[in-house]
Image (tube, rainbow, N blue to C red):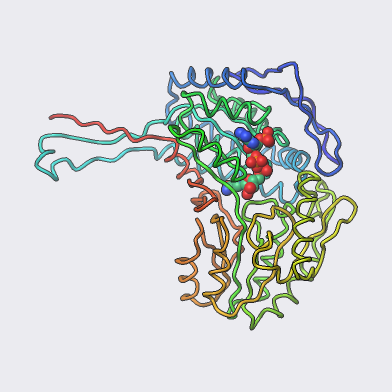
Amino acid sequence: MATTVSDRKLLLDGEWVETGEWLEVASPYDGSTVARVPKAGADEARAAIDAAERAMREPLPAHKRAEILVRVAGALGRRADEAARLISAEAGKPLKAARAEVARAMSTYTMAAVEVRKLAGDMVPMDASQAGEGKLAFTQRLPIGVIGAISPFNFPLNLVAHKIAPALAAGCAIVLKPASQTPLSALLLAELETDAGLPRGWLNVIVGPASEIGDVLVEDERVKLLTFTGSPDVGWGLRERAPRKKVSLELGNATPVIVEADADVEDAATRCAANAFSFAGQSCISVQRIYVHEDVYERFRDAFVPKVEALVTGDPADEETDVGPLINRDDRDRVLAWIEEARHGGAAILTGGRLEGELLLPTVVERPALDAKLSCDEAFGPVCTLQPYATLDEAIERANATRYGLQAGIFTTSLRSAFEAGRRLEFGGVIVNEAPTFRADQMPYGGVKDSGNTREGPAWAVREMTVERLVVIQL
Ligand code: NAP
């Protein structure tokens, strides 16, 4: 059963507000009402930008920003169980995975606090040229200005943390629009930041129709950076509409992993099974396409499938559950349709491929056609494919045969193959001997191709959220 929580309010200019209209947050598992949140629109979005702009007129010194970030990390630790239950209730995320998300959000805040205290510019060696003689020059890193942020449903706490913690570290006030399906974790973070001493206006959280609020964030010139995590079509569409604004995009992937003949096959099978189905595959770097060298293909398959079948599917609030529901029925039915498409194209379904009650069972599809959706598009569901290959060249070519490029992986004991993959896989990150789902929050994380145009991780996000100002002094 979903946890019941009370009605919530939005954070606008330091006040907890209602709007007179309500949005219902429903459990993806059983449809029960988890909470209601006020529904905001364009007016609240504009008021939030006003508040953010006012807040930035009185900059917060770095040590105060760092103290707030450290306090939030501590408070999150003290309220970890509550936060995990909230994530689980609103997103349908199994508690195990929700607890891991809370620990990661603490790490995101901790790393952001480190970055504030390091925020500094560079000295420019002016007498290195004749023109600079007699002058002193340095750069400062200054806040870019008001930030607009839009976040997705799948990591409702930590992906919000990846926006609002670096924004505060950079000295920027922010207007956040979390996913309508999962606003509660974002509102919890807002509460923790306020309790930690954040002055009014620095963080504003509004929930409501995406395009209406998105339009204001795109069109209002006071928003200097729009940071978006979500699906590629929405993200690139926003960027096209805001040519004069900085728009940072963290988008999808169709995550490939290569298992070479010299790999530890058992270890690779264990890691892939755990990382293809966590949160029902609704992670942007969930293992989706597994390419296995033909010499070890059968050994891998025979080790992998029983591990998938051993995963517990069920109520996300149950501590034993590994795989819960998809975020909604439409997505579940879409993933089922993709599995059917692969089957009609000649693929074998090794396990799953059907519903148990309302839940889609973890599904392994063998040898889908190369142009099947599961072979190149983002499934974002509890399904992965197995495909044998003959040479590393062939595996890399297949892994790259997608419009996406976020993270990829390879299991191999050969340094040469690992370097080769690191060089030739066209992805933002290549993970060796671990599932490509791996992410520690201080890592630079982001994609190439359709997967995005930026890097998150507090150190990198703070760079995006600040501008370099040059000061030259005639001595
Ligand atoms: P989504 O449908 O694109 O929604 C993401 C956010 O965008 C939500 O807040 C949504 O609001 C908002 N939105 C939707 N249409 C909009 C519009 N026209 N203008 C402005 N905002 C709009 O994505 P999702 O289903 O929540 O998330 C899944 C996707 O995110 C996958 O593709 C996944 O790979 C990607 N993702 C990427 C990363 C990464 O770091 N690279 C991390 C996690 C997820 P509403 O909820 O109100 O519709």
What residue is shown at x 66% (from left), y 81% (from top)? 296
In this rendered view, identify the residue nearer to me: 94 or 366: 366
Q: Quadrant of residue 354?
A: bottom right
Q: Return the x and y of residue 418 as percentages of the image width and height.
A: 49, 71
Query: Measured along the vertical axis of the image, is residue 231 above or below residue 428?
Result: above
For residue 191, side relative to residue 65 (left or right): right
What residue is shown at x 80% (from left), y 42% (from top)? 28
Q: Return the x and y of residue 169 as percentages of the image width and height.
A: 47, 35
For residue 184, side relative to residue 43 (left or right): right
What residue is shown at x 76% (from left), y 23% (from top)? 22
Identify the residue at the far right of this view. 357
Residue 135, can we see it?
A: yes
Q: Return the x and y of residue 352 as percentages of the image width and height.
A: 82, 63
In this rendered view, identify the residue nearer to me: 160 or 396: 396
Q: Quadrant of residue 156?
A: top right
What residue is shown at x 50% (from left), y 56% (from top)? 428
Residue 103, can we see it?
A: no
Total tally of numbered discs in the picture: 0
In this rendered view, identify the residue nearer to me: 148 or 238: 238
Q: Return the x and y of residue 390 as percentages of the image width and height.
A: 59, 80
Q: Quadrant of the N terminus?
A: top right
Q: Quadrant of ligand 1?
A: top right
